[in-house]
């Protein structure tokens, strides 16, 4: 499927470009015929330059040169029928058209080279982003998963929001977090926290111990990079959730992160009780006390995790996005459909563009446990910007 799609796209682009070439060619023919049918004191030949000038908008330098040559040929035909090639007026028109066409071809070549360089840079950037943002599996443990990531910066696929999931010791552990700041400048802290989570998830028995380990990683990172002016400015809000394979009792601990939403069939949305502690990286005299909250997550329910970029998205009148209210109408939707509904509704609310990175994960609990193991995976999942 993937290889067929990759072959089909260049072929469609090639067909589209050649179809568009008919436009400047038809323009040349129309101008030439019109000039030949008008009196000799009316000169439409200079308008032929529109054809090669139009071509670089959809074609490369070779096609532009071809159209330019056809325009010059049309000007020669016009000259031959209107006073001959030796007249000063026609010589000036032909030479001018040749020079302008050459300039347009040079412009097209430079533009094509820069486009190729930009495409290469984007390819490298996407590869780097995917190294950090591994895709979440569709199934892990007793969960069916879908995710959504909307980066605030143009051309970026990731930013300061992050999420990961891993299966270990008969349970699934999920992390969702939000680095202070947005866009590409926050990727360093996000990468640090994700690496620490993947490693520490297998070494610590409780969520509180895991949260403490992540706190220590963030503090070491900030101690090395913080300047005196930035002390206390680097921090991460995070929510850790542990979902046992066989037990509906689910555990979570929050470091300054908003609580999840529990979606049950029949348009029921509840907010599990959450007692957040300070964000990771915020200095505390005796160290933050991590509270463990427990709630029931039954088969058929969907747990929706999100970052504050979702609930802080504003409409044209400054109103925040009412996530709990909106998702109440989609509690029976599959995780993938839920993500698509939220994406469309959220962007419509925000006028098509968010002011901050936004991430969501939908965890639907099934009756069966999927035994295939997935280690430390993270990423965009089934829905993107």
Image: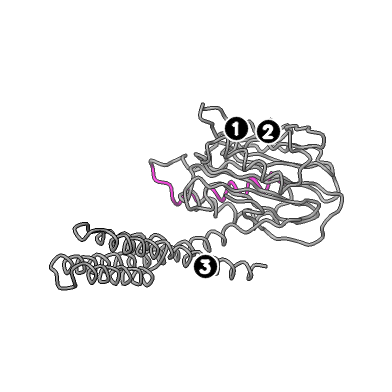
Give whichever of discs 2 and 3 has the lower sequence position. 3
* SS for callout 1: loop
Against 241, residue 200 (above or below) is: below
Q: How far apart are marks 1 and 3 (CA)?
A: 43 Å
Q: Position of residue 263 (x, y in %)?
A: 76, 37
Q: Position of residue 122 (x, y in %)?
A: 47, 61
Q: Toward the viewer: 21 or 43?
A: 43
Determine contact: label 1, label 2, CB under 8 Å: yes
Q: Position of residue 108 (x, y in %)?
A: 34, 65
Relative to 337, 345 lies left or right: left
Q: How far apart are marks 1 and 2 (CA)?
A: 9 Å
User: Does the segment drawn in magenta span residue 360?
Assistant: no
Q: Mark 2 points at which residue?
A: 326
User: Does the segment drawn in magenta span residue 210?
Assistant: yes
The residue positioned 50% from the left and 45% from the top of the image is: 152
Q: Which of marks 1 and 3 is in front?
A: 3
Q: What segment is highlighted magenta in the picture?
A: 207-228
Against 137, residue 240 (above or below) is: above
Q: Mark 1 points at which residue?
A: 321
């Amino acid at each position: 499927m993937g290889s067929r799609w990759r072959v089909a796209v260049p072929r469609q682009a090639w067909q589209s470009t050649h179809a568009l070439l008919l436009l400047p060619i038809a323009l040349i023919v129309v101008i030439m015929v019109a000039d030949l049918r008008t009196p000799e004191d009316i000169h439409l030949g200079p308008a032929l330059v529109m054809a090669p000038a139009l071509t670089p908008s959809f074609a490369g330098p070779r096609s532009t040169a071809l159209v330019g040559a056809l325009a010059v040929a049309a000007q020669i035909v016009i000259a031959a029928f209107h006073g001959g090639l030796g007249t000063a007026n026609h010589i000036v028109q032909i030479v001018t058209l040749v020079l302008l066409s050459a300039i347009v071809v040079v412009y097209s070549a430079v533009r094509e080279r820069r486009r190729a360089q930009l495409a290469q840079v984007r390819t490298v950037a996407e590869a780097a982003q995917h190294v950090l943002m591994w895709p979440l599996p569709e199934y892990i443990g007793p969960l069916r998963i879908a995710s959504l990531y909307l980066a605030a910066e143009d051309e970026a696929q990731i930013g300061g929001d992050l999420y990961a999931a891993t299966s270990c010791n008969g349970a699934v552990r999920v992390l969702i977090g939000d680095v202070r700041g947005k866009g590409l400048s926050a990727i360093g802290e996000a990468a640090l926290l994700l690496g620490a989570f993947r490693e520490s998830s297998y070494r610590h028995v409780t969520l509180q111990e895991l949260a403490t380990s992540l706190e220590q990683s963030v503090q070491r990172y900030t101690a090395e990079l913080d300047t005196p002016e930035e002390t206390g400015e680097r921090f991460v809000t995070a929510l850790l959730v542990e979902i046992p394979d066989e037990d509906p009792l689910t555990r979570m601990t929050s470091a300054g992160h908003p609580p999840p939403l529990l979606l049950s069939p029949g348009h029921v949305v509840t907010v599990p009780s959450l007692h957040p502690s300070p964000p990771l990286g915020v200095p505390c005299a005796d160290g933050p006390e991590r509270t463990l909250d427990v709630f029931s997550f039954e088969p058929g329910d969907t747990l929706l995790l999100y970052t504050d970029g979702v609930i802080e998205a504003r409409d044209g009148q400054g109103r925040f996005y009412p996530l709990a209210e909106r998702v109440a109408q989609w509690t029976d939707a599959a995780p993938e459909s839920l993500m698509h509904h939220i994406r469309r509704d959220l962007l419509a609310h925000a006028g098509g563009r968010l002011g901050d990175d936004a991430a969501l994960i939908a965890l639907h609990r099934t009756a069966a446990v999927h035994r295939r193991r997935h280690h430390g995976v993270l990423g965009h999942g089934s829905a993107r910007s």
